[in-house]
Image (tube, helix red, strand yellow):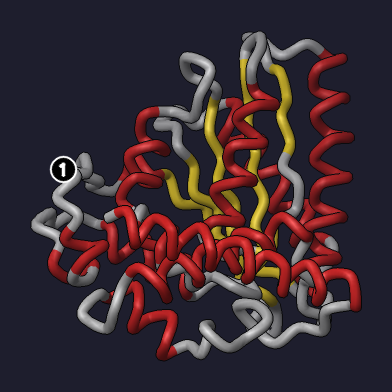
Amino acid sequence: MPANSAGKRVTAFVGSARKKHTYSAVREFLERLEARGSVEYEIVPLSDYRIETCRGCKLCFEKGEEFCPLKDDRDVLLEKIMASDGVVFASPNYSFQVSGTMKTFLDRLGFLFHRPRFHRKTFTSIVVQGVYGGRKIVKYLGFVGRGLGFDVVKGSCSTAFEPMTEKEQCKRDKTLARQSKRFHARLIGSRDHVPTLFELMIFRMSRQSIRLTLDDSYLDYTYYSDNGWFESDYYYPVRLGVVKRSAGNLFDFIFARISKARADQG
């Protein structure tokens, strides 16, 4: 594993057991990233870890992730994310979605969509496909990244037949070069990501729903309370312009009414 003690740490989680197209695309991306300076990286093939299928018991939602009955490598992988400044999720296109291994991994992180904790960490995705559908997977992984709290850099999709043609290789090289440049700039940059209107809406919707429908007997409620999110503009201190500040207030008003109406009906 390349290392630079003064640099940013990037970890790539690969949802394929084959060290072929997806793995090689990830390695090329990371090597280009490293060449730009101040980066160390690790590639984590998810197939090397024991990841059990979520049973849907909801104990992680209601009481906390430590109450999960599954005793697999979830926390080992979670620690790798927490120790990283940048994260990559990479998957082949299997049946027009992420691989089963990647989906099982994401399902094991489900509680984090309720209690996101990866703010100020940069995220991107890499999808490799044989024919069609990969761009929708990139969009899906971007949505997942935002839901987990990451600062998302748009991912990439490349097509790779076996063997790869020279044209495919050239196109992939250019795509990964552009992606690594964007990712590196965001990773090294000192300014916090200013939320989009959509990201701001999701935050305000979540907190109003939790504030008005739960109480301190629920972990989601105490998590938001402990982080000061019931009073803050966003998950972390950020300067909102006039338009976004006004939009945030409007979102609060709308979702407060919706949450109250649902609570009254319940």
Quick one: 159 or 150, which is closer to the camera?
Answer: 150
Quarter-of-image position of residue 58:
bottom left
Q: How many marks on residues?
A: 1
- The percent coordinates of residue 55 (x first, y second) are 16, 43
Residue 49 in picture, x, y percent from top left: 28, 48
Circle 1 sits in a helix, a strand or a loop, which is it? Answer: loop
In the image, taking residue 254 as reference, residue 69 lies left or right, namely left
Q: Amino acid at mark 1?
A: Arg
Note whether 266 is above or below 104 in the view shown. Answer: below
Q: Could one spot residue 23 in this view of the protein?
A: yes
**Residue drawn at x 19%, y 45% as measured from the top left:** 56
Q: Is residue 117 above or below residue 225?
A: above
Which one is nearer the viewer's eye here, 44 or 105?
Answer: 105
Where is the C terminus found, in terms of image quarters? bottom left
Q: Quadrant of residue 202?
A: bottom right
Please identify the quarter of the rendering in which residue 102 is found: top left
Instruction: Say which residue appears at 48% left-offset and 73% top-offset.
Output: 117
Q: Position of residue 119 (x, y in %)?
A: 59, 73
Q: Nearer the viewer, residue 260 or 22?
A: 260
Q: Locate residue 40 relative to residue 209 in the image: left or right.
A: right
Q: Residue drawn 65% across and 27% down?
A: 136
Number of other residues with Cα within 10 Å of mark 1, as a class: few under 14, some 14 to 19, many 20 or more: few
State which quarter of the image contains the N terminus: bottom right
Q: Which residue is mark 1?
A: 55
Answer left or right for 90 relative to 116: right
